[in-house]
Image (spheres, rainbow, N blue to C red):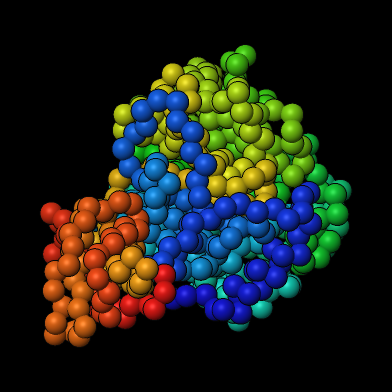
Amino acid sequence: MQLSLHSICLLVGILQSLPVSAENITWPWQTYRSSSAEPPSLNITKYGPTSPGYLFFDQNGQYAHNYSLFIMSDDNELVWQSTIGDYAAFQTQTFEGKPVLTFFNGISLPEPYGWGHGIIQILDDSYTSIYNVSLTAEEEHFVTISELDPKQLASYLDMHESKITAENTILVTAYNVTQYDLSSVGGPHDGWVTDCLFYELDVKTSKVLFKWSALDHVDQIPISNVLQFYPVSDFGKNQSIPYGYFHINSVDKFEDGSYLISSRYYCSIFKISRNGTVEWTLQGQTGGDFQLDDRLSFCYQHDARIRQDLGNIVQISIFDNDNSDVVSGVNQTKGIFMTLDTETEKAVLDQEYVDAQDPVFARSQGNLQLLDNGNVIMGYGSTPKIREYNPDGSVLMTAQFGPGDGVIFSYRAYRQPWTGRPKTPPSAFACIDATNNKTSVYMSWLGSTEHNSWKVYAGSSNSSLILADEVERTGFETLASIPGQFALVQVEAQGPGVTNNRMSPVVISQGVC
């Protein structure tokens, strides 16, 4: 299931109408002769050895060169780029014992909304779509803002979560525009809010296994508690500008089957029991049900994750934006590891991750990933940077793919191992260098990680192609220069794991290079 072209065009129109603080913003991108891919050129600075694995990120924002998904290396080499679309939360996960790629595919609405409608798409290692996880308006009675046509929305799942669990289910979020009396918090009696929901679904059927709604639990999470962090202001007057007071942005699952959720505007994370009640609240400024140690505070956070679950002792990590559309430019964005003791009701800071030499004030989005070797990856959301830290908090690498904050961004970013085995064949481009009596051959294989060399065949007809050269792979695109002028060229990828689809189509050499 793919969202319609109409919806994508609508999104682009919305984004293009946004004001920005700078004009003529550009960022360099890469181009190739053998491929139409155009990934950003990463500005990479390393301060030490980095971890194995590729960088996974999406590219979005008003000044993004293209809205795509990317897998790239530390050497600024492309591995794979998706088609154009509105995507988020791109990563590899494990489903039924096999590695898969997962991401949100739909339309996303910019601030002051900050949510979207779409599907969670799952690809196998050949980049073939195998599952589309979705929830429709008919199934869950979803409502959107007045400006969107519900008939054009194939699914109402949101971009904020798509975590596959150990039980091979998937955790997802949704935003539902709902009428609600806001008079008790200074809003209209006939007001509108954006209710935040999370679900646990069956991946293959999208069957609902668990459902939770923030509005159903205002007795435990009162709307009045959010006002100091996100005032009602002019929101909530009609269906076009609902008051998005909760803003759920991550869901994780405890070993006992309960859930950990993050609310951006409450500056809080909550433990939700299997019966839907709130077991505890950790509020980043006041503590909520916990006493914060003197070093621990957070607000407007994203990506709350359970790192260790020992019953009453729980270690949690968050991406602490500490900036938003309400307050920004005061406190640096940082990564936080903290330990909660539910018996003593104390929350203690374990480790912070922040680059004092290059402060970041990310107003939205972002994530923190713990690698197997103890290193930490942080994707800075609305600030287009990816960083790797040592366990002690020192910076190992910064990769930048855009300027400033809020004009080019990636919802989350990861470093992960990946083996890609595309069903599509390699691509080649050839041109005649008559001056030097040579044929230049450019070759690439989008998505392949296993080939390490190329064979180049050339001739005057399909039946007369002969082996003209063998070259080592030199990045995403490899150039071979073979003596003579050949009308036709074909390339073959070589590597220990390469068995299928390794021959490119035969291409006609262009008259000039």
Residue 413 shows in this picture: yes
- Could you say which is closer to the camera, residue 27 or residue 353? 27
- Could you say which is closer to the camera, residue 142 or residue 448? 448
| Position of residue 58 measured from the top left corner of the image (x, y, whole percent) | 50, 55
| Residue lying at the far top of the rendered structure | 294
- Could you say which is closer to the camera, residue 151 or residue 405? 405
Q: Quadrant of the C terminus?
A: bottom left
Q: Residue at x 61, y 52 (%)?
A: 27
| Position of residue 345 measured from the top left corner of the image (x, y, whole percent) | 53, 21
Is 422 located above or below residue 343 in the figure?
below
- 499 sits left or right of 131 in the view: left
Q: Residue at x 67, y 48 (%)?
A: 406
- Could you say which is closer to the camera, residue 114 or residue 345? 114
Is 292 located above or below residue 9 in the figure?
above
Q: Residue at x 37, y 68 (%)?
A: 435
Residue 342 shows in this picture: no
- 133 sits left or right of 40 in the view: left
| Position of residue 479 measured from the top left corner of the image (x, y, whole percent) | 32, 59
Q: Quadrant of the N terminus?
A: bottom left
Q: Residue at x 62, y 14 (%)?
A: 294
Could you say which quadrant of the image residue 152 lies in? bottom right
Could you say which quadrant of the image residue 151 lies in? bottom right
